[in-house]
Image (cartoon, helix red, strand yellow):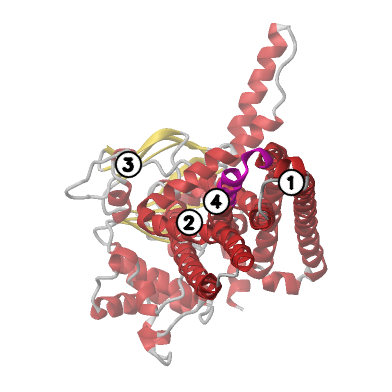
Amino acid sequence: MSSWTTYKRLLRYTIPYKTAMVVGVVGFLIYAQTQWIWAELIKYIFSAIDSGDQTAKNLIAVAIMVIFLVRGIGSFLGSYGVAYVARKVVHDLRVELFRQLLSLSPSYFDQHASGRVLSKITYNVEQVAGSSSEALKIILQEGLIVIGLMVYLIYSHWKLSLLFVLIFPLIGWVVRYASRRLNLVSQRIQDSMGDVTHIASEALNGFNVVKLYGGGPFERQRFDDASQNNLKQSMKLVVTQSINTPVVQCIVSIAMSAMVWVALQPQLFGDTSAADFIAYLTAAGLMVKPIRQLTQVNGTIQRGIAGARSIFELMDEPRERDEGGQRLSHVRGELAFHEVCFEYPLLEDKSHRHTPAAESDDDAPSRQDDGQQGQAERDHRVLKEITLTIKPGEMVAFVGRSGAGKSTLASLIPRFYDPTSGTITLDGVPIEALSLSHLREQVAMVTQEVALFNATIAHNIAYGTLEGATPEEIRAAAEDANALEFIDALPDGMNTLLGEEGVQLSGGQRQRLAIARALLKNAPLLILDEATSALDNASERIIQTALERVMQNRTTLVIAHRLSTIEAADTIVVMDQGRIVEVGTHKALLAQGGIYTELQSTFNKTQPSKQV
């Protein structure tokens, strides 16, 4: 996206506030007129002195007061109008950007560091703010002054004014060259700022690990390097700006000197009065400041354009696919997987980058290379030909070693990801044919990583579409999740503010609130991904009893490493390396003597150590 294309797109956001923009432009237009009027006042003063007209002299003080009054009104209207539009635009951009982030698929966040994404909302948007507020103010205010003074100079003596007109292309070339440099460096500054935010975010989120494993020196060096790179790029920006302005000033001063020399030639200005001559030089001198201001603002504009470009790139990211519009009048909860395969996009890209292309002309080696490449691609698949039917109201447990694909399979049901191939149906309808909102209304999910928000406990349980729940319903869900014990012990009970990510709670307490949230949703599909992993044995038994009640007449998928929690499952699915290798009840699988038996044996050996 070119700079001009980016800026035009940014200007479209000002259209809803065109009235305020018109007020701003009119204000600066009024302000600009006071400049050439000031030059005309100088001419009037000299004429009054030469003529000795006392009445004319008395009007000079009134004229000065009126000029400054009009100037102040114009400056206020212009500054307020432009600032209002600029802040509205920044607000709209930030809101639209956040909405876009919420509409992206999880795969985007798998491939982009959260620190760099947050940098776009904070740092990059503020760069746009500078471009659309202060820079726009200077462009309008100083630009209109230059135009007004140039018209005055041409009207006064158009031949002499040609010297000024001739330098504008040269100034334009200098500004254009500097703009390219400033734009490039601005992009690098934003990238380096994203690195700073990303590294700081990682270090703070993993603060305990940094402390425990002595990672302080490594993190300090990483941050120092990123900050040093940001400093380096910022100084390049300063150097470019610092050179740009003196060069333009030098060009203007040369034009001014040439103009003064020509103006002092008697054959040119011989019949011109001293008052006219002084007024002309005053107007020409007033051109220097606005031209300097216009060249200095170029850096701010380029930073804003670079920020806008990165923002628009994020806004143009494809949103989650929501092409289905069907809704089920009644959800029974039958789930069916038919030859489902899945591969993470990032892994797919890596396989393409690292797989060499066959270069031999021999057919046999080429076919062999193709086969090896296909095998390599298959090895990168997280799920491979999953075929399974889960009946309504059935409890199905998924077990297997870490990395077997259990959690990935569960994340396909609410369409956090879409299968690479194959189909998943809910009550016989492909889930991609259902609207995303309707599909996700049918699913309650508790995962290993609990997401809590800086709000009250009641708000965290009755979150989102559940906010209409009554206090009694919220309390009942908390009781079923064995959470009332610690909630009632808190000073404000349900109204206790949790802080960021529930920092005031233990891991087990946070997980019980997540379970309460899932219970309150009362969806026909319930997914428990290590839902009791952070609980002690006593709490786990209590919650397990509550979950058994909730699971009745509800299709439940349970992913667990504690095999004791899934022995009563209707069906146990054993996964290994992305495939289903065993299916059956607890007793039937033990009788087979396969992988499930090995997992059970390993689990039994570790139990004594876990109870100590």
Few, some or many C-alpha atoms within 10 Å of disc 2 (few <14, some 14-19, many ≥20)?
A: many
Q: Is residue 106 above or below residue 562?
A: above
Q: How many marks?
A: 4
Give the foreground label among 4 and 3: 4
Q: Which residue is mark 1?
A: 263
Mark 3 or mark 2: whose residue is earlier in sequence:
2
Q: Gap in Å between the C-alphas at discs 1 and 3? A: 82 Å
Q: Is residue 401 visible?
A: no
Q: Gap in Å between the C-alphas at discs 2 and 1? A: 29 Å
Q: Which residue is mark 2?
A: 29
Helix, strand, or loop for circle 4? helix
Few, some or many C-alpha atoms within 10 Å of disc 3 (few <14, some 14-19, many ≥20)?
A: many
Is the N terminus in the top left, top right, bottom left or bottom right quadrant? Answer: top right
Residue at 62%, 27% (x, y): give it.
Answer: 375
Q: Which residues are magenta?
A: 146-160
Few, some or many C-alpha atoms within 10 Å of disc 4 (few <14, some 14-19, many ≥20)?
A: many
Mark 4 or mark 3: whose residue is earlier in sequence:
4
Residue type of the residue flagged with mark 1: Ala
Using the image as rendered, state which of residue 554 and residue 113 is in the foreground: 113
Q: Which residue is mark 4?
A: 148
